[in-house]
Image: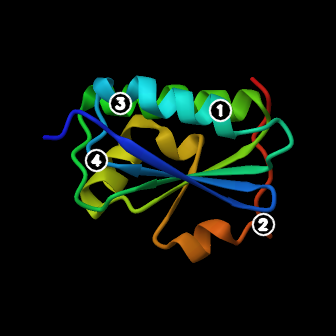
Amino acid sequence: MRLENEIRVERYGDVIILDIRGDITSYSETALKASYHKHVEQQDRKIILKIERDAYINSGGIALLIQVLYLIRENRQIAAIVGASRHYKKIFNMVGITKFAKICDTLEIALDTSDSKPGPNP
C-alpha cells in the first residue's frame, strides 16, 4: 500500500480531471483536498475523479471520496468517477457514492456531459 498520492490535473474547458495516482486512504486527504481547492474554480461545471484500476481504497478512502463529492455538490458541480474496478463500483453503489457521482467505465464516457446536470444543493 502506497501512503502518498500524486494528483495530476487536466482541464478540458469547464471540466477538471483529478487523476489520483496511488491508493486512496485517509492519508490521501491532504493531497486530494489541496488539489481540489487549488485547481477547481467555481465556474468549473464538472469534476472527474480518475482513479487507478488497481488502487486500494479502504474505509478512510471511501469517507474521503464522499467528503470531496459533497464539496463538489455544494459547489453545484457535476461529479464523475472513472477507473474504478468492478469490486469498487459495487462498494460505491452500496455506500451511496453513486448518489453523488456517475461511475463511468471510460474517461470518454465521463467527459460526455450532454445528459448531466448538477445535483441539488443540499
**Residue behind mark 1:** 38
Q: What's the amino acid at mark 2?
A: Asp
- Other-residue count near label 3 (Cα within 10 Å), few / some / many at <14 / 14–19 / ≥20: many
* Number of the front mark, 2 or 1: 1
The quadrant the N terminus occupies is top left
Comes first in the chain, label 3 or label 4: 4
Is disc 3 placed on a helix, strand or loop?
Answer: helix
Residue at position x 27%, y 35% from top? 4
**Numbered disc total:** 4
Q: What's the amino acid at mark 3?
A: Ser
**Residue behind mark 3:** 28
Residue at mark 3 to residue at mark 1: CA–CA distance: 15 Å
Is disc 1 placed on a helix, strand or loop?
Answer: helix
Comes first in the chain, label 4 or label 2: 4
Is disc 4 placed on a helix, strand or loop?
Answer: loop
Q: Could you say where residue 17 lies in the image, as x and y percent from the top left?
A: 59, 55
- Other-residue count near label 1 (Cα within 10 Å), few / some / many at <14 / 14–19 / ≥20: few
Comes first in the chain, label 3 or label 1: 3
**Residue behind mark 4:** 22
Report whether 113 appears left or right of 28. right
Q: What's the amino acid at mark 1?
A: Lys
- Other-residue count near label 2 (Cα within 10 Å), few / some / many at <14 / 14–19 / ≥20: few
| Badge 3 vs badge 1, beta-carbon distance below 8 Å | no
Q: Quadrant of residue 111?
A: bottom right
Residue at mark 2 to residue at mark 3: CA–CA distance: 31 Å
Comes first in the chain, label 2 or label 3: 3
Residue at mark 2 to residue at mark 1: CA–CA distance: 28 Å
Q: Could you say where residue 9 lies in the image, as x and y percent from the top left?
A: 57, 52
Residue at mark 4 to residue at mark 2: CA–CA distance: 30 Å
| Badge 2 vs badge 1, beta-carbon distance below 8 Å | no
| Badge 1 vs badge 4, beta-carbon distance below 8 Å | no
**Residue behind mark 2:** 115
